[in-house]
Every structure is written in structure tokens, then in C-alpha cells.
Image (tube, rainbow, N blue to C red):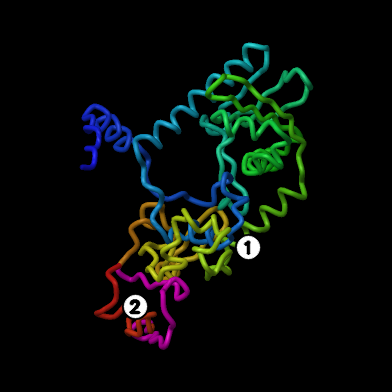
């Protein structure tokens, strides 16, 4: 007889539920700087277009984020302890430093700017703070973060680019041992310009770029394994219905999303909700377009199973 699972703790369940209720759910306004070195252009396109559901909040996941914030606060306090001048708030907004590049569609939040760093006291540094478990920490400290933690390196580089600064300070703390690793990073303009150009290209596309892997099940296709858009990309699922998957909308610098029908800038809430006039970007429909009627604003497709589907017709999906 199989062993019974341990009893559910109602206390833990209540804590998880409280964290989920307090979480900010929804899609990112743009491409996060923490994702820019993802090797798949198509995954970034789907995320930007809100084609798949965002990762759902869980109590454990929210607590991990909170723990990271606690370590960041401690590291900033340590910098102040040794005499550094630490600035966390953008004086122009009264809020945390926000960074926007690529027409505003490439976005990030900067931890701090500091002076008085012992290695170069007069030089302002962009400060990037992280925490890691023992295994990750030991991997990070083996070499420069350009090689051992390239996603963190990319974030720091883009902050330097946006702020017009030349030096960054990367601090990571081992959550198991409280050991601290520090690395000073020099601004690499060519690296930053290449990333920005890539994101500008992806956000301007009207159809998904080529897949990174045609077969998501093959050995080595690890990027596909946990990709939120796997069902849309590989399994014939429809994309979500919202303004970013609608053929009438377009991304513009600002950042803005504009409806081609009403010729107005769409608020975040409008983009999420969509409207009854929604018609899919044809490349986001799992089938082949066979006809279009401008008078009735319908588009006809033959789906993968051979059936005919009319987007905008009586049989079309509700917007």
C-alpha cells in the first residue's frame, strides 16, 4: 500500500494564499533587461506581444522575491557602513531609478548609484545587487560575470549605458554562508548597442521570428522545455486575445501602443482587456490564412486539423 502524503498545513496554505493575493500579476510593459540575453528571439517576441499567459504567482515564488529584496537592503546598508554615498531614489521622480531603452520598450529598475567605493572613491558606480544559493554563488565567483552570470552582466551594462556612466559594481551574497563577492565592471558600448539593436528589431516585428529549435523535445532544446509560449510556438495553441495580439495595434516609441482603428494610445488596462473588434495578427493563428474580407473585417483560416475558422465571423473566438 502506497504511503499517504503528509497532511496539508492550513497555516502554510494561508500564508501562500496571502502572498498570492498581494502579488502584482500581469504582463510586463516591455522587454525586461533581465531577459535580454535569452537566446530565442521568438520567445522575446511572444513575451512582448503577450501571446502566452505570464508565469503565475505562487507563495514560495513571492517569498523568494521578498528574500532577495531583504539581501539587497542589507548590501546597501553595508556600503553605507563603509562610508559610501548610496543613492536609491531618482530625484526627478521620487521613485526607484527606472531605465528605458529601445524606444522605451526595453525596461529595467536600477538598484542604486554609489560613490566612495574603496577601489575608486571618486568614480560614480552603478550598483547591481544579487543573492544566490551556495551552488550558484560558487559558480559565479569562478570568473567575470560576463561569463559566469551573463544575464546579470547584461543588466549592469544596460544601466551604465542608460545613465552615461563607465563603472559598475556587482555585489552578490551567498544566502547559505553570508559570503560576499564583489566585481567592478567597465562599460562596454559595443555590447550594449548590439543588445539594443536586437530588441528594437524584435519589438518592430509583426510576425514571430524563426524558432530557436524546431523540435522542442530534442536533446539540447532546454530553452523550450519551460518556455511559457511553448504551446503557442510548437503545439498549435491560439495566442491570447488582447491588444498586443491584434493586427490593428502597433508599438511605437514612448513607449506606446496605438490602436489603428481608433488612432489612440492604449493604456495598459486597455491592452490587457482588448475589445470586440480584435482580430489576430495572422502569424499568431495556428493555421494558414486563406481569405480576407475588408468589408466585413473577417479573416479566414484553415487550421491544422483541416477545419475552417473565420476570425471576426460568428464562429470566431470571442474577443
Percent position of residue 137, x then y: 61, 30
Q: Label 2: which residue? A: 311
Q: Is residue 319 magenta?
A: no
- Give the residue at the far front of this rendering: 1
State which quarter of the image contains the N terminus.
top left
Where, by quadrant of the figure, is residue 252 drawn?
A: bottom right
User: N-terminal of the two: label 1 or label 2?
Assistant: 1
* Residue 291 forms part of the magenta stretch: yes
Q: Is residue 30 above or below residue 21?
A: below
Residue 94 x %, y %:
52, 29
Residue 64 x/y as whole percent: 44, 32
- 292 in relation to 256, above or below: below
The segment highlighted magenta reads 276-300
Q: Residues within 10 Å of mark 1 (few under 14, many from 20)?
A: few
Q: Which residue is tagged 1?
A: 201
Q: Nearer the viewer, residue 231 or 152?
A: 231
Residue 313 found in image quarter: bottom left
Amino acid at each position: 500500500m502506497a504511503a499517504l502524503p503528509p497532511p496539508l498545513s492550513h497555516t502554510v496554505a494561508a500564508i501562500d494564499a496571502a502572498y498570492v493575493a498581494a502579488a502584482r500579476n500581469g504582463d510586463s510593459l516591455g522587454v525586461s533587461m533581465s531577459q535580454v540575453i535569452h537566446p530565442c528571439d521568438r520567445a522575446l517576441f511572444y513575451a512582448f506581444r503577450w501571446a502566452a499567459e505570464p508565469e503565475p504567482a505562487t507563495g514560495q515564488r513571492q517569498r523568494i522575491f521578498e528574500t532577495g529584496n531583504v539581501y539587497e537592503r542589507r548590501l546597501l546598508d553595508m556600503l553605507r557602513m563603509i562610508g559610501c554615498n548610496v543613492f536609491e531614489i531618482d530625484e526627478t521622480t521620487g521613485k526607484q531609478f527606472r531605465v528605458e531603452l529601445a524606444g522605451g520598450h526595453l525596461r529595467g529598475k536600477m538598484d542604486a548609484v554609489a560613490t566612495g567605493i574603496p577601489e575608486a572613491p571618486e568614480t560614480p558606480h552603478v550598483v547591481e545587487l544579487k543573492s544566490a544559493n551556495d551552488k550558484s554563488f560558487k559558480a559565479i565567483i569562478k570568473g567575470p560575470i560576463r561569463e559566469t552570470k551573463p544575464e546579470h552582466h547584461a543588466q549592469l551594462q544596460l544601466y551604465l549605458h542608460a545613465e552615461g556612466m563607465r563603472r559598475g559594481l556587482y555585489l552578490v551574497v551567498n544566502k547559505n554562508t553570508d559570503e560576499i563577492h564583489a566585481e567592478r565592471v567597465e562599460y562596454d558600448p559595443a555590447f550594449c548597442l548590439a543588445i539594443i539593436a536586437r530588441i528594437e528589431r524584435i519589438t518592430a516585428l509583426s510576425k514571430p521570428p524563426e524558432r530557436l529549435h524546431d523540435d522542442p523535445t530534442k536533446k539540447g532544446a532546454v530553452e523550450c522545455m519551460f518556455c511559457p509560449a511553448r504551446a503557442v510556438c510548437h503545439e498549435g495553441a491560439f495566442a491570447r486575445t488582447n491588444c498586443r495580439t491584434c493586427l490593428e495595434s502597433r508599438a511605437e516609441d514612448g513607449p506606446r501602443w496605438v490602436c489603428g482603428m481608433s488612432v489612440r494610445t492604449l493604456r495598459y488596462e486597455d491592452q490587457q482587456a482588448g475589445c470586440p473588434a480584435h482580430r489576430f495578427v495572422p502569424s499568431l493563428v495556428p493555421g494558414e490564412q486563406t481569405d480576407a474580407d475588408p468589408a466585413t473585417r473577417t479573416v479566414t483560416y484553415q487550421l491544422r486539423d483541416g477545419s475552417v475558422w473565420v476570425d471576426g465571423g460568428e464562429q470566431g473566438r470571442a474577443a
